[in-house]
Image (spheres, rainbow, N blue to C red):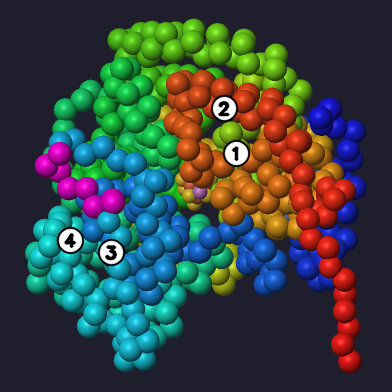
Amino acid sequence: MSPETNINPAEVRQDLLRTYPPKVARKRLQQIVVKESPGEHAVPEIMANVRTTPGIITQRGCTYAGCKGVVLGPTRDIVNITHGPIGCGFYSWLTRRNQTRPPTAADDNFMTYCFSTDMQEEEIIFGGEKKLRAAIQEAFDLFHPKSIGVFATCPVGLIGDDVHAVTREMKEKLGINVFAFSCEGYKGVSQSAGHHIANNQLFKHVIGRNDTVGPGKFRLGMLGEYNIGGDAFVLEDLLERCGITLVATFSGNSSIDRFENAHTADLNVVMCHRSINYVADMIEKKYGIPWFKVNFTGAAATAKALRKIARYFDDPELVRRTEEVIEQEMTEVQTAQEEIRPRCRGKTAMLFVGGSRAHHYQELFAEIGIKTVAAGYEFAHRDDYEGRRVLPTIKVDADSRNIEELHVDPDPEKYRPRASEQSLRRLENEGLPFKDYEGMMPAMDDRSLVIDDISHYETERMIEIYRPDVFCAGIKEKYVVQKMGVPCKQLHSYDYGGPYAGFRGAINFYREIDRMVNTRIWSMIHAPWENSDPAIDAEYVRRS
Ligand code: CFM
């Protein structure tokens, strides 16, 4: 299946657009681009982070999902109350996706619960603040948490409940940190707005509340790692073996204490650029902690990330230990690659996922010889495709203006530059750029197709045209893709697999993909109507 394709991506693009009315086609034309020129500065411009045209079936989720589910979901000891109808809370329960390891059995872990005000018609008509107040009180009485978060859903915004006033009042009354998120589902274009709302509130209400500097010589903050499939556990182990102390992670396997203490790290690394890059910037401005982008997806990328961290801290013992860990791990990785690559080489993949994985996983596929022929994000912004150099040229539209931009100044007491300008410049000259991300497109081959916010129709056409060996997306796409005879790997929840981060994760991924692309099962299934003997026979009878 799928040899090095002779398919002309420019023609595919025209093909995809043909079905749309002219106005929609003109918009999609800007969101579907062919990566033609090599090199970082020759990537085409793509339209991203704009509203999906009504009527198109999108992969996207809502702002509430990005805030409550993605950013706060993996934190174990905040009671997260959904203020809204029960469906919003129920569908963001995520008990299978969110994993956590409390340090002891006595530590709080509310992840298995689903807290909601369960709004009814009565509250929609007469207001829900009373019920919200009662819910906060009830949660406090039952669980005595250190903190309570409240998440607004669409109806809350529409009827105008003041969630912030209620949480301020309850914070005072209960003496614990209670804060709210105006993350109504419709608030932004996608979940990306929800990340921003979540992160702004964490920055305002949580980060910086505890100045105790814990032990550890090399103190690291990890931003944009959400412990999907146990990824965080692999990374925590890896860092510990190198001798690096993880101060806080936003927000895989996290706790509120760690968030409050995050400003005591000496370096921040950013995994998922989309969901959190602005927090890295804000922390740097306020507290003086520099940041750079890393990627722990893929064995080579993991080794590179560890080396960058060791280089920054500039300590011979750390460098030695890091190299030792890399060497140990790479032996096993190479054995796995050598076994699996011959079976996978030349196969093709498509990735349409979120706002960072469609990029990161291309590397993992490439390590076993699988080529990505097309990829795209659901909700990323232009900088995630084209690199941060386009940031000054991104037009700020009404939807973006709707999301609060915090103005941040150096903290008069807590600001402490961790490295001099001079030493940062020196490291940059040595190939360790700070505050930089090149985006997905420069890393892709020429003639690959890049599609933002792919529609359901386009997904089907792409599969028909390219017949990829594996398609990566989420649960909403999975069975449609598989019914077309192509295996679908979920990269949001990893199906039941994972972890895929770090070296051990990479080996897991190779093995799973090997099984998926080399099984013949998908080509053997046929829809009932494709059989020669119809199961049901009927005649059309017209009555007049
Ligand atoms: Fe970042 Fe994420 Fe992603 Fe994301 Fe997500 Fe996710 Fe994702 Mo699903 S924060 S952008 S909103 S890496 S939930 S953990 S898998 S779409 S690519």
Give coordinates of residue 121: x percent, y percent.
37, 87
Please, what secondary structure does the residue beneath circle 4 have? strand
> Magenta segment, which residues?
105-112
Disc 2 target residue: 512
Q: CA distance from mark 3 to mark 4?
A: 17 Å
Give coordinates of residue 279: x percent, y percent.
39, 49
Mark 2 CB lies closer than 8 A to ligand 1 = no
Q: Main secondary structure of the magenta part?
A: loop
Please, what secondary structure does the residue beneath circle 1 have? strand
User: Which amino acid type corresponds to the residue marked 3 in the rendered image?
Assistant: Phe
Q: CA distance from mark 2 to mark 4?
A: 43 Å
Marks 1 and 2 in Cβ contact (< 8 Å): yes
Disc 1 target residue: 489
Give the number of marks: 4
Q: CA distance from mark 1 to mark 2?
A: 9 Å
User: Which amino acid type corresponds to the residue marked 1 in the rendered image?
Assistant: Lys
* Relative depth, front residue between 210 and 155: 155
Disc 4 target residue: 177
User: Which amino acid type corresponds to the residue marked 2 in the rendered image?
Assistant: Glu
Who comes first in sequence, dot 3 or dot 2? 3
Decide: few, some or many residues near mark 2? Use Cα within 10 Å; few <14, some 14-19, many ≥20.
some
Q: Which mark is residue 115?
A: 3
Quarter of the image for residue 49 reads bottom right
User: Which amino acid type corresponds to the residue marked 4 in the rendered image?
Assistant: Asn
* Relative depth, front residue between 344 and 502: 344
309 vs 44, left or right, is left
268 vs 485, left or right, is left
Who comes first in sequence, dot 1 or dot 2? 1
Q: Is residue 240 above or below residue 70?
A: above
